Amino acid sequence: MKRISKCIIVLLLTVIISGCAPTSSPATGGATAQAPTVTATLSTAVTPTVTPTVTAESKGVENLIIIIGDGMGQAHISAAQQVYGRHYGFTDWDSTLINTNAINEQGEASVLTDSAAAATAMATGVLTLRRRVGMDKDETVLTTFLDLARQKGMVTGILTTETLLGATPAGFSAHVKNRFDPQEVFDSQIDSGVDLLCGAPDPICAANREQILQAGYYYCDDISGIDAEPSKKQYWQLDTLKTSPEVEPVSLAELSVAALDHLDAKGEFIMIIEQAHIDKFCHDNIFDRTVHSVDMLNSTVERVMEWVGERTDTAVMVLADHETGGLVLDPEAENSYFSPITGEQIAYEYTSTNHTTDEVKLFWHGFEPNIAALPYFGERDRIKNSDIFYMVCELLELKAGAEGK
Ligand SMILES: [Zn+2]
């Protein structure tokens, strides 16, 4: 009886939910993928029951650039602007708060997330357990919006300041049970079909160079060589941080433009750019490197917006996957940082060395998501991280089973 009731609920939800909700997925990893909307709805009481829409002005958008600040809470953005004495233009864009929570084994929400579950929620519309990468809590392989974009004939790219095997890039491109199994992440990611993969040098990637070449990628670990074989898929191992005295770091902003140029020459595209190090320095409570990482993200946003220029076919999102460090700016806070740029003292305090449940923000440019159509927003005045999937699908008209061009 229970099983029959569950089937009826699934059928009803499948009928109710139309538009971008995929009903099948590409073969990935041999497991059966499933419609993310239905899973999300059954997993938690806080996911949307209708597909959100975008406004008529959003039609005509063909490309999407998503810039993720891993761990970037609202205080982080404020702190960086104070330290650097700059106003970050993206903070003037339209925005909403995001609830970032994951789920537990029982499918209940309100669980502190990690970058794997957060990326999976945004990429697939399905809330999942911490450590899961592109899989739901029952280890079902999920379809990402990058998968759907490729089915539509678009090209896709992922660029990060950390290794490609990190939880955020993995959540958008791989399907494994545990983020901490890097070889499995590598094997799954290399089969994902993502057209451009760029991350910090990683020994597993370097050791598996032959596998990368066999998968049809041009492998590049020197910035001077990135244009050598543009007809191929691209696998770049380039460092945006000065992790070695011998290696000059590559600018994240300029690397982002190189990646955009590459994808744009091939067709309509989705590009994901991650500043992973806000999170890392917040775990260690290192304030100056935290704000430097946020400022690097802002420089990248500014350079990307120069690249977009007057184009109306390209939308941009700036968002965070969760807050890290519980950063608080308060005149009474116990720590003080002297800004050599503004000459001001900034009082701050980290209240955690982990992620927190603080809401983060999504800023958007070049389109108008109708977030008021989301039940979660209607009830709580903020979106759920899994709603990002629906926004992207709606904006780019992504549907399962779309014919390739
Ligand atoms: Zn973290």
Image (tube, grey):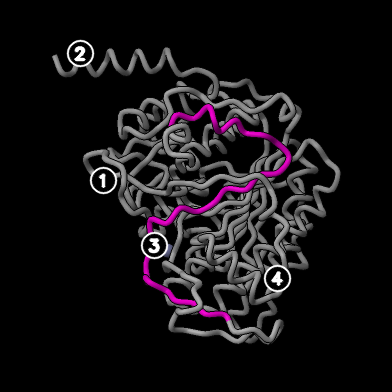
Q: Which residue is under mark 3?
A: 355
Of labels 3 and 4, earlier in sequence is 4
Total marks in image: 4
Of labels 3 and 2, earlier in sequence is 2
Residue under the image location 40 percent in, 48 percent down: 133
- Farthest residue in the right direction? 310
Amino acid identity at mark 4: Val
Label 1 residue SS: loop
Label pair 1/3, CB-CB below 8 angstroms: no
Tag shown at residue 104: 1
Label 2 residue SS: helix
Q: CA distance from mark 4 to mark 2?
A: 57 Å
Residue 6 in the image: state x and y as whole percent.
24, 19
Left or right of 248 on screen, residue 336? left
Residue under the image location 37 percent in, 18 percent down: 13
Q: CA distance from mark 2 to mark 1?
A: 25 Å
Residue under the image location 49 percent in, 61 percent down: 71
